[in-house]
Amino acid sequence: MDNKNENSNKIKTQLIPSIHNTVSLQAHLTTKDGEPIVGEEVVYKLYSIDKSFLTQYSRITNEEGLVHLTLNIKHKVYIEICYEGSEKYESNNVMTFRTKPSDDEKNVKTKHPLQVQREEKLEQKKIEEKKKNLLDFQQKQKDLESVDEDNIAIELKNVNLSFTIGSDKIDNLKEYVIRTIKRTKEKKTIFKATDDVSFKIYKGEKVGLIGFNGAGKSTLLKIISGVYTPDDGEVIVNGKIAPLLSLGAGFDKNYTGRENIFLNGAILGYNEEFLNSKYDEILEFSELGQFINLPVKNYSSGMLSKLGFSIATIVEPDILILDEVLGVGDVNFKRKSREKLNSLIESNITVLLVSHTISEIRNICEKAIWLENGKIREIGEVNDICDKYLEEAKKVSDDKTKKLKPKRF
């Protein structure tokens, strides 16, 4: 859009939309002959929707007569671009931009007062329910803590586990020996997967582990399951564990499915007599049929998951440990495995669940443990902890977005 004042100077303005409420406003000042006006002050004035003045920004045109301003706008505003400050030019209102209103503003504009009132009541009801749930949870925890220690299913005391990470790319013994003698090997770094972790889980509790990737959730489950031995600290587990971690882990690829039932069952602590008595039941639930006599190296990932799930859930454990395995195999097996898990969860067993699906944590668990960088950040009532976690996740996401260079169209 071109506008001219009485001196016939021109200013062209352009609105450049970017990402996440970010806009770039550019102005180009030229004379009537098209020569750039250099060193001219351009003022961006921002007004609210009721035309109240908010703030202003001043920029000086460059050698091409160009000037621009990038803004992060979350609410609807009016923006005027003017050039002024010299006797040569009058204040010239060049263009008014009206930014796109947010979805919240659109909703508020169209909502009936009665609808707003109903929503306020619902919001107040949610707050009251949240307070009640928090008080009930705190009372239940006090009741559990008052009973004897036999009621504890899992207890961790100052558990630490570190991994040594090497950056050397040594793939043969000869190179390893040479670099050891010459002392040219790079120093290894120590990664602390869990850092002084302590908590108690009582019998019958349903507990969710949440946290960002790399927080140490899966590592902690493997420590409790006995896959990893901590460097120091104490792990106390009272009862039989059914760990549904990486389904199919521990299978020998050259063995048949039948042979792996006995191998994997032995790893889980089942004796041969018990596995023989449950073999037909495992085979039927896994739906593998004649494929049970083939080496598992020929199995698809879905078939491996079916077999692993069928072995792990053959008995009702005292403690069920789940690591992102709430749906395996094809559609029919997913339904069947979900029903099996629900029947276990609804019984009086202790459940420890890791999932990035917060809705599943809310639906299944009553208590949540928030891990961050191998440490416990907070333990508490599941909805309270999940709300705080989601708020933190949104904040982290917004911070990362701000660091992105706005993309112009």
Image (spheres, rainbow, N blue to C red):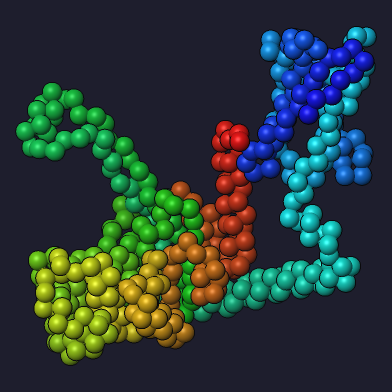
Q: Nearer the viewer, residue 210 or 89?
A: 89
Residue occupying the point 40% across, 66% down: 324
* The C terminus sits in image quarter: top right
**Extreme-front residue of the structure:** 33
In the rendered image, which quarter is residue 338 located in?
A: bottom left
Residue occupying the point 86% across, 20% down: 4
203 relative position to 141: left or right: left
* The N terminus sits in image quarter: top right
Horizontal and vertical percent for residue 165?
28, 41
Q: Is residue 13 visible?
A: yes
300 relative position to 174: left or right: right
Question: Taking 352 as reference, is 71 above or below it?
Answer: above
Question: Taking 106 as reference, is 66 above or below it?
Answer: above
50 relative position to 208: left or right: right
Residue occupying the point 64% across, 44% down: 20
Q: Nearer the viewer, residue 28 or 288?
A: 28
Horizontal and vertical percent for residue 72?
70, 38
Horizontal and vertical percent for residue 142?
59, 74
In the rendered image, which quarter is residue 274 located in?
A: bottom left
